[in-house]
Image (cartoon, helix red, strand yellow):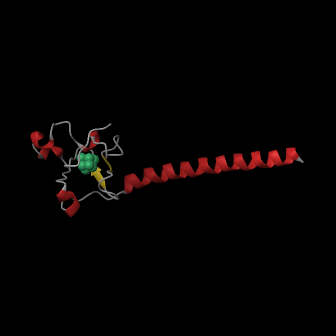
Amino acid sequence: MKDDHNSDSRRRFIKGVMISAAALQVAAVSRRSTAAELPRLDESEPSAKALGYVHDAGTVESATRGGSDRVCATCRFYTEPAEAWGPCTLFPGKSVAAKGWCKGWVALA
Ligand code: SF4
């Protein structure tokens, strides 16, 4: 009787772990495709203009940016450093250019 109970608990636990692992895989795949499909942030959007966002950091003086290495790809808020375009936490639902820049730039931790 007790063994049946333990077996049931173990089965439910293993089933729960397998379902969680599957859900994480689906979420990871979904996140990847979403990042690739995000519309690009338009420089003329009010939120982009407010932070001085540009697709090409080279169009902004290095001194204004605080250094030539300050681009989206080196910013803490850029979540896809290996991609040319990727999501930025400051502009939800949009992708920004890896070589872009805005006034919200913060160094990677
Ligand atoms: Fe680029 Fe960082 Fe500005 Fe986002 S917050 S647009 S990643 S510089």
Q: Tell me where residue 68 appears, x and y as whole percent.
A: 16, 37
Where residue 45 sits, quadrant-wise, is: bottom left
Does the rendering let one see residue 68? Answer: yes
Q: Quadrant of the C terminus?
A: top left
Does the rendering let one see residue 43? Answer: no
The one nearer the camera, 89 or 83, is 89
The one nearer the camera, 18 or 36, is 18
Q: Residue at x 54, y 52 (%)?
A: 26
Left or right of 68, for residue 85: right
Name the residue at the bottom extreme.
46
Q: Residue at x 19, y 49 (%)?
A: 103
Where residue 69 sits, quadrant-wise, is: top left
Q: Tell me where residue 54 appears, x and y as whole percent.
A: 18, 51
Q: Residue at x 18, y 61 (%)?
A: 44
Q: Tell me where residue 2 appears, x and y as whole percent.
A: 87, 46
Left or right of 76, for residue 50: left
